[in-house]
Image: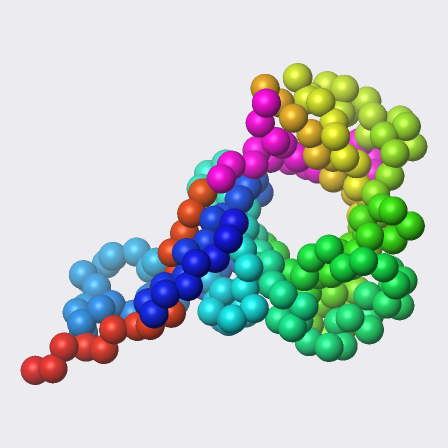
């Protein structure tokens, strides 16, 4: 999802349809108009995400949407300079030195704001997710399918037509879970399975596009 810059907007492709946090404050209405009484508040991205999208370091964005249409998570991929320097030091400690693959900021459904860094270590991708208070949310490692716990493999086998391509284990603050990427009928999907074998979500990845305004028009002169 390449971001195209102009004087007035950033265009970004948002990938993924799956289970983002947003504020319920109403958006400004152009040209000084007012919202009709009783109209529903329009959801807004958090300042954390908007600062990232408006940054010159922004590369692409990603939305996670639940089945009922709620935007549950949002993510922005950035250049290295888009993350605080201290995050790279945390990655050194938790992942080790290696080839950097991606830099991200993300807001989870519970409002948690994180920085994420992915690296290739010993030939395999690894990722660390770091909260803004500098505490590690999780470390993700790539694992072989043959090493998956039996209960996870059993759940995976029940997903009709799912052909696994990548297996990732996330060891977090509370528990471990597995993110299995694969294909169903030629379309990329991700299965999120708990360490106890519970299927937490099955998400389909779709290409989309969003335009992010970087200039807000002033109210018309009276």
Q: Position of residue 20 (x, y in %)?
A: 54, 54
Question: Vertical placement of 61 versus 9: above or below?
Answer: above
92 or 128, which is in the foreground? 92
Question: Vertical placement of 73 versus 80: above or below?
Answer: above
130 or 81, which is in the foreground? 81
Instruction: Please say whether residue 46 is visible from this viewpoint.
Output: no
Residue 48, by quadrant, is bottom right
Q: Position of residue 33 (x, y in %)?
A: 17, 69
Apparent side of residue 84 relative to residue 94 in the rendered image (left or right): left
The residue located at (81%, 48%) in the rendering is: 125
Q: Which residues are magenta?
A: 186-207
Number of marks in the rendered image: 0
The residue located at (75%, 71%) in the rendering is: 87
The residue located at (82%, 52%) in the rendering is: 120
Q: Main secondary structure of the magenta part?
A: strand
The answer to whether residue 195 is magenta is yes
Question: Vertical placement of 151 versus 125: above or below?
Answer: above
Apparent side of residue 192 relative to residue 95 in the rendered image (left or right): left
The answer to whether residue 221 is magenta is no
Instruction: Please say whether residue 104 is visible from this viewpoint.
Output: yes
Q: Position of residue 74 (x, y in %)?
A: 55, 55
Outermost residue toward the bottom in this view: 222
Q: Position of residue 151 (x, y in %)?
A: 85, 27
The colour scheme applied to this rendered structure is rainbow
Residue 166, by quadrant, is top right
Q: Quadrant of the C terminus?
A: bottom left
The residue located at (25%, 73%) in the rendering is: 217
């Amino acid at each position: 999802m390449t971001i195209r810059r102009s004087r007035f907007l950033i265009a970004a492709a948002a990938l993924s349809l799956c289970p983002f946090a947003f504020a319920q404050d109403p958006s400004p209405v152009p040209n000084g108009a007012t919202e009709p009484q009783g109209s529903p508040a329009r959801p807004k991205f958090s300042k954390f995400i908007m600062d990232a999208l408006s940054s010159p370091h922004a590369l692409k964005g990603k939305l996670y949407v639940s089945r009922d249409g709620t935007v549950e998570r949002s993510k922005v991929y950035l250049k290295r300079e888009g993350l605080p320097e201290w995050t790279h030091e945390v990655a050194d400690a938790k992942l080790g030195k290696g080839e950097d693959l991606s830099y991200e900021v993300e807001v989870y459904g519970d409002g948690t704001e994180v920085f994420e860094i992915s690296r290739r270590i010993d030939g395999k991708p690894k990722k660390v997710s770091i909260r803004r208070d500098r505490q590690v949310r999780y470390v993700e490692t790539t694992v072989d399918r043959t090493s998956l716990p039996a209960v996870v493999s059993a759940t995976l086998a029940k997903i009709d037509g799912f052909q696994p391509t990548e297996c990732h284990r996330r060891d977090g603050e509370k528990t471990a879970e597995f993110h299995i990427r694969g294909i169903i009928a030629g379309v990329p999907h991700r299965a999120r399975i708990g360490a106890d074998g519970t299927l937490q979500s099955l998400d389909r990845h779709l290409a989309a596009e969003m335009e992010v305004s970087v200039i807000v028009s002033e109210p018309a002169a009276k």
